Image (cartoon, helix red, strand yellow):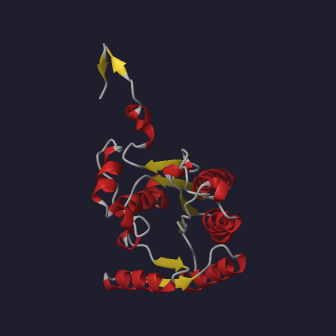
């Protein structure tokens, strides 16, 4: 929605085509241009077909945001191989396939921006979340590699790492007042993010406002990653607990 308000023509590529069509309808209702297209990003042939559909509708592609993921929690010693593969195929292999396919079209135009959505769970361990942390850490490195390898061809690639944010995937958890308050308490800014605040980071990195930025990872977490030592017991100065 924010991209459309900035003047972008938007393609919503999703395995959940009905949800994608709902987003398409919302954008069109606001007067924007959008279309929904089905894709399973873990399958190369479907990614190639998606790219053809994008080119057919828009003739060129200026920006790409890769944000598909599925979280399958579990202890590593009990994690089924198929759950590991599913998370990695969607959240890492899928990002690579989309960037490779769409990025080659951008290269032919000599300009483009790619944004991968990682997580602060890729910057620090996220125990009992299965392959999630490993997948998101790989996403950060993937963004750095594309950002450096394609920089001289006019293509920028960067990553954002959201902290705690209410999304359809996390909504049920935040519906519990105790969990919601506890999670907000470990964020220096005292709250979790709104989805729009994450989208704003994507818009910035897609736009020409960041035209000399490539290969970075941008945390959008209210300072959570950098505040770990604030929550470490026993930090004192002059015999008093630091707060």
Quadrant, the C terminus: top left
Quadrant, the N terminus: bottom left
Residue 212, visible in the rendered structure:
no
Residue at 68% in and 79% down:
48
Residue 100 versus residue 221: which sits nearer the camera? 221
Residue 220 versus residue 183: which sits nearer the camera? 183
143 with respect to 6 (left or right): right
Q: Residue furthest top?
A: 238
Residue 41 versus residue 102: which sits nearer the camera? 41
Residue at 37% in and 80% down:
27
Q: Residue furthest front?
A: 78
Give the vertical position of 75 relative to 175 (above or below): above
Residue 134, image x, y percentages:
62, 53
How many marks do you count on the picture?
Answer: 0
Residue 58, image x, y percentages:
54, 81
Residue at 71% in and 75% down:
44
């Amino acid at each position: 929605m924010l991209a459309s308000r900035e003047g972008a023509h938007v393609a919503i590529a999703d395995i959940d085509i009905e949800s994608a069509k709902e987003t398409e309808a919302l954008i069109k209702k606001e007067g924007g241009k959008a279309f929904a297209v089905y894709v399973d990003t873990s399958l190369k042939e479907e990614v190639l077909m998606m790219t053809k559909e994008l080119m057919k509708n828009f003739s060129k592609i200026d920006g790409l945001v890769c944000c598909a993921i599925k979280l399958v929690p579990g202890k590593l010693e009990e994690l089924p191989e198929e759950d590991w593969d599913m998370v990695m195929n969607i959240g890492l292999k899928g990002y690579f396939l989309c960037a490779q396919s769409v990025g080659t079209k951008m290269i032919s135009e000599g300009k483009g921006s790619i944004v991968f959505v990682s997580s602060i769970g890729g910057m620090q361990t996220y125990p009992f979340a299965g392959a999630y942390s490993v997948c998101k850490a790989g996403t950060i490195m993937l963004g750095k590699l594309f950002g450096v390898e394609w920089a001289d061809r006019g293509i920028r690639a960067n990553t954002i790492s959201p902290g705690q944010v209410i999304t359809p995937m996390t909504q049920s958890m935040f519906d519990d007042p105790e969990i919601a308050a506890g999670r907000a308490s470990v964020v220096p800014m005292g709250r979790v993010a709104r989805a729009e605040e994450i989208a704003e980071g994507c818009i910035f990195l897609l736009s020409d406002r960041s035209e000399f930025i490539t290969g970075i990872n941008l945390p959008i977490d209210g300072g959570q990653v950098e505040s770990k030592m604030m929550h470490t017991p026993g930090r004192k100065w002059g015999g008093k607990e630091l707060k």
